[in-house]
Image (tube, grey):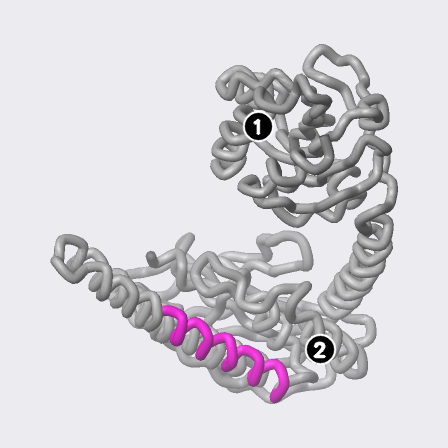
Amino acid sequence: MKRLLFITFLGVLFFGCKPKDKEDYNEFILKGNIDTDEIRSLTLEELTTCDLNFLDSTKTDASGNFAFRQEIEEAGFYILRESRDNYVTLLIEPGEAINLEGDADDLPLSYQVEGSEGSILLMELNKRLRKNIAKVDSLADLYRESRYSPNFEQIHNELNKAYTEIFEGHRQYVINFIEENPHSLASIIALYQYFGDKVILKETEDFEYFESLSKSLAENYPTNRHVINLKKRVSDIKRARVQRQMAEEKLAVGNPAPEIVLPDPDGNSIALSSLKGNVVLLDFWASWHDPCKISNRILKEIYDKYNHRGFEIYGVSLDRTREQWINAINRSDIDWIQVSDLRYFSSPVVSLYNIEGIPYTVLIDREGKIVAKDIDHRVIEEYLEDLL
């Protein structure tokens, strides 16, 4: 679970001492010492808004001393790397002289950094994450040890409760970190931090933190690319919210179902409106999603039972490839209408019908109007008995 210990951008640093001369203001110096009994190779990379760019490399001396000097135009995130998983992330401002010390074999856990407020904040943030992930690793060990215990179910429930407490505690720490450091770029890292493979703050549910941080950082860093990128993301979320709200209004029960025209497996375009006169279940699914496989088996029984009475299913696949889509149709013995543009969640139908997860269904009456949305399969037959 070592890989679970890192944020999207994880880091560790130590700051060195050098007076700031005016002519050196657009550069930083990163030097330090890592505890090692052999010469080590180190690389310095820049973490941009969309990529990781190599900047420089060096070797330590036999005592583990190293140094980098780099010209920069604005504050940014940098990674000092010894190996793929052995690295630290720094937040560096122009003119800083940074000193970093740590164990060469485990930089993220051992490092200390001086000379940079932003890097010190990241160090605190990342070490708290490591501490809590270590607790979760211990729970995982207990889970494996107790799998064959006669009271495993009770132990399992207790471990789940303990995990939730650890996660929620770290989530609150992250929120406090952002609120206490609204003018530090380090809070961007906190904003997008992961707890293992689980995102801590969700853009939709925790939007207030994204928006408030964007505003506060813009005061100190109005031209910084990381701040501009966050501001753009906030704008995109707002726009998506408006679009979802507008779509939801159009999708209200009693309104006409928005038109869909997509190709079937043979390439023939089939319009949803062509089924008018039937009761139609609009079913969004995908071959790669296990719950959809279960859904298809249930729908098969319902379709065979009610099709002769004027019931149709218009299946819209959110698959990526035609081969996966066709294979799933054949495996599930699907004999109702199937269409797809093979654009996954980038398909226009996703925003058209406000789809946030699959399987997702919309029941449409004979007049083409929406009767119900996201229906539990157990009650579909109750609707059909009334509508047919």
Looking at the rendering, the stretch of residues picked out in magenta corresponds to 163-180
What is the secondary structure assignment of the residue under circle 1?
helix
Q: In which quarter of the image is the N terminus?
A: bottom left
Label 1 is placed on what type of residue?
A: Ile
* Closer-to-camera residue (363/164): 363
Q: What residue appears at the point 53 percent right and 22 percent down from the top-left corner?
A: 328
x and y percent of residue 373 in the render?
70, 46
Mark linked to residue 302? 1
x and y percent of residue 133 in the render?
36, 68
Left or right: where 376 falls relative to 279: left
Left or right: where 359 falls relative to 244: left
Question: Is residue 387 in view from this perspective?
Answer: yes
* Closer-to-camera residue (83/186): 186
On the image, which quarter does residue 178 sit in? bottom right
x and y percent of residue 52 in the render?
60, 54
Q: Quadrant of the C terminus?
A: top right
